[in-house]
Amino acid sequence: MYDPLHDSSPGCGEKYPDSYWADVSTDAPVDDGQVKQDIDVDVAIIGAGYTGLSCALHLAREHGIKAHILEANKTAWGCSGRNAGFILKSSGRKSYSQMSNQWGEEVMRGIYGEMCAGVETVNALIAEGIDCDQQAAGFIKVAHKPKAMKELISLANLQKKMFGYDVEILSKDDVRHRYMDDHNAYGAIRYQDGFGLNPLKLAWGYHKIAREAGVEIHCSTPVIDWHEKKSANEIKEKNRQQLITPNGIVTAKKVVVATNGYTPKGFHPLITNRTLPVLSQIIVTEPLTDEQLLACNFLTSNVVMDTRALKYYYRKLPDNRILFGGRGAITGKSAEDPYYAKRLLSVLKTSFPALQNLKYDYAWSGWICMSLDDIPHIYQNDEHSVFYSMGYCGSGVSFSVQAGKRLAQKVAGKAVPNLPLYQKALPKFPLAPLRRVGQWGYFQYGRIKDNWF
């Protein structure tokens, strides 16, 4: 499997992974084909995932700027088409209490507002007619041990006080009788506004809306090299960015890097050594029978996540399959090892002992993008000619759309909120060549913490 820390290209025109989403999604959108000649553009966006599509759409609609998207493979071939499809008001891995301690309450509330705006933007775009198999609203955060339930209650009380958030506290019996008989649940808190959907269909919907707004989307067009073209008259004209593709050079005034966890090795100095791509693994089971659903008291289609450091998450899909996810392999070379899918299935069966004979029909993995400080960053170079948005830390399905909107404002030269998300560069990883060693160490720490502390 393509590994961003080792490979210089994600390929060209690669097919979608053998995922459940790719199997059940039909009516793939039409794109504008490969770039087949040299072209000059105002804005080139690299990557046709949520971020790139949102940036292009908002550039067209709100700023009257036409962007050209360059996608190495297919729209949402990366994480946008491989994730679990959870729409949440999430801020990455940094908690709101940590933000408040670090930056003060005003900044913390500003970031919370941006996460809320991300969900609102997703909902507004879906309302334009995107059919993405949206399920009933509700997000259940499950305590995986009794001590964790005390922490969840404190979190719920804090969020009620901070934001007036509607958070319901559920006892162990509440969870098992009203939602699902998860034997690893020791209680939970439930939010009213999270939900699940088909993430690939969502991206395809963004694609169609963006093209209707005048955006050109060139698939099977990887950027294989990148140069800066010096202006003959540097007083009147700024340098241009030259993006080399297999069949043509794209010369752009401004470039947006929207590749997140799929950014190739050494892609651009502005982002080198500033992210850590981490594999997430997902399985989708065979459909549950009525008897199996009854035995598990599986009444809910709410999205579910637990409190482990190495989190597990799941949801019941519209056809009564269970999607179940967690961490995957450390390297792309090991990504296809069936051990990781089988491990997830075995954990699922500890939650639902009645499913001992259950099998999975789909297994796939994808790269999420971690930042050193656990929050995403939307930033640019000093010349305001190269921009990026990265580091969603596994929580980008909704916020990436807001990030794309803010990127569009930056590209158009407009002001954005004075928040760390938008005003600070991604910090560099110390000892960057050893990032994977640190990741392995964190996995070992997380396993011990989840089991013993």
Image: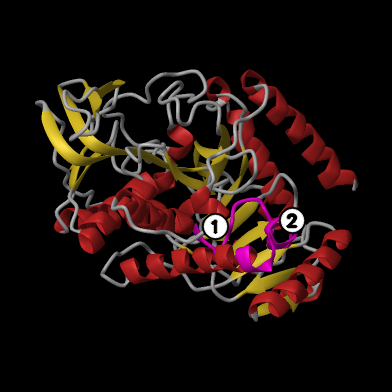
Specify the segment rendered in magenta.
86-107
Q: Amino acid at mark 1?
A: Leu
Residue 238 percent coordinates (x, y): 24, 33
Q: Amino acid at mark 2?
A: Thr
Label 2 packing within 10 angstroms: few (<14), some (14-19), many (20+): many
Left or right: 391 as drawn, with respect to 262: right
Left or right: 289 as drawn, with respect to 39: right
Q: Could you tell me which residue is drawn at 44 percent across and 19 percent down?
A: 7
Q: Which residue is mark 2?
A: 307
The image quadrant of residue 430 is top right
Closer to the camera in the image, 209 or 310: 209
Secondary structure type for disc 1: loop
Q: Could you tell me which residue is drawn at 15 percent across and 21 percent down?
A: 247
Q: Could you tell me which residue is drawn at 58 percent across and 60 percent down?
A: 90
Residue 397 percent coordinates (x, y): 46, 54
Colour option used = secondary structure
229, above or below 148, in the image: above
> Could you give the CA–CA distance between mark 1 and mark 2, rounded to whole angstroms?
28 Å
Q: Which residue is mark 1?
A: 419
Residue 285 visible: no
Left or right: 415 as drawn, with respect to 288: left
